[in-house]
Amino acid sequence: MIAMQPENLRSLAEQLLGGKLSVDEFTDRLSRRPIADVGVAQLDLDRARRCGYPEIVFGQGKNVAALKAIFESLLANGVSVLATRVNADQARELTPHFLGAVYNPVGRTFRVPLESAPDRAGDRGHVGIITAGTSDLPVAEECRETAEWMGARVTMVHDVGVAGPHRLPARLPDVAGADAIVVIAGMEGALPSVVGGYVDCPVIAVPTSVGYGANLGGVAALLSMLNSCAANVAVVNIDAGFKGAYVASLIAGKAAASRAES
């Protein structure tokens, strides 16, 4: 962790005495710890202040020792852990070291809550998640875990793709009133456009790599979604359940805050 330099501390004290900073602003800046140096990573501890949510760990390519050091530092600094793309072997070695750790083998997410933190699930708006098919579940589970970690209430609707178009209208009441909806689809990626034509909120489309040869590992679905004629559809990267959830949860969080103020 980088300590505040004496000259910075002196400057803050002078601003406080000169009336340029309030006591609350002074204490906030004094207690702020921007970086935690754990050797293998430089953790951004100021991200929650700047961006609304703390740093999330991308587990792919990191060894267990590195992940353990990162998780321990986050928890020590009051940040609950969410790591994505954690494989089963990594999770097996990590779990005994962290009280309350939860691994989702389908979504490949690893979460560690703060022991003293209150349960805020559902405080930050409502996110719907809709999948075209069962093969899209790994991306959907990554999406769900992320949205719940961010405090959103999540409603999941599975297997309502365009091959059976009668299935979607029957499930629309489940996501009625959602602040944002993440729609996850492979193959030709048509479902987000259909959903967009039914709902009055932003639709975050997530193309998946599910499909036969000409699907091109999700490129066909990506291009289809980018060409959506539904005006409320925006698109993230292939298999990016985390990114879809993050954008949707930011929208939901702002909407919930607005409702609380009114």
Image: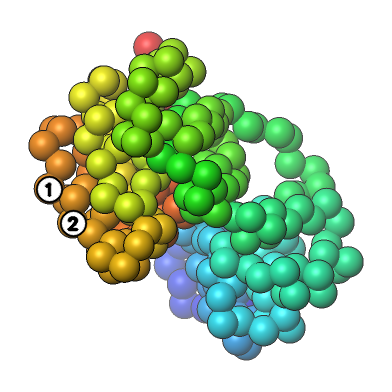
Residue at x-position 57% and y-position 62%: 84
Residue 168 in which image quadrant: top left
Q: Which is more toward the observer, 54 or 133?
A: 133
Quadrant for the N terminus, please.
Answer: bottom right
- The picture places residue 22, in percent across and down from the top left corner, at 45, 43
Left or right relative to 208: residue 197: left
Spot occupied by residue 10 in the image (x, y as percentages of width and height): 49, 70
Which label sits on residue 223? 2
Measure how far apart labels 2 and 1 are at the Cα level.
6 Å
Name the residue tied to disc 1: 227
Residue plotted at (28% across, 38% down):
192
Residue at x 52% of width, y 44% of height: 134
Between 216 and 8, the one lying in front of the other is 216
In the foreground, 14 or 210: 210
Q: Are marks 2 and 1 in contact (CB under 8 Å)?
A: yes
Q: Which of 253 and 147 is in front in this view?
A: 147
Residue sitting farthest toward the bottom: 39
**Residue 196 in picture, x, y percent from top left:** 24, 29
Vertical side of 96 occupied by 53: above or below: above
Q: Is residue 226 above or below residue 38?
A: above
Classify mark 2: helix, strand or loop.
helix
Disc 1 residue type (three-letter): Asn
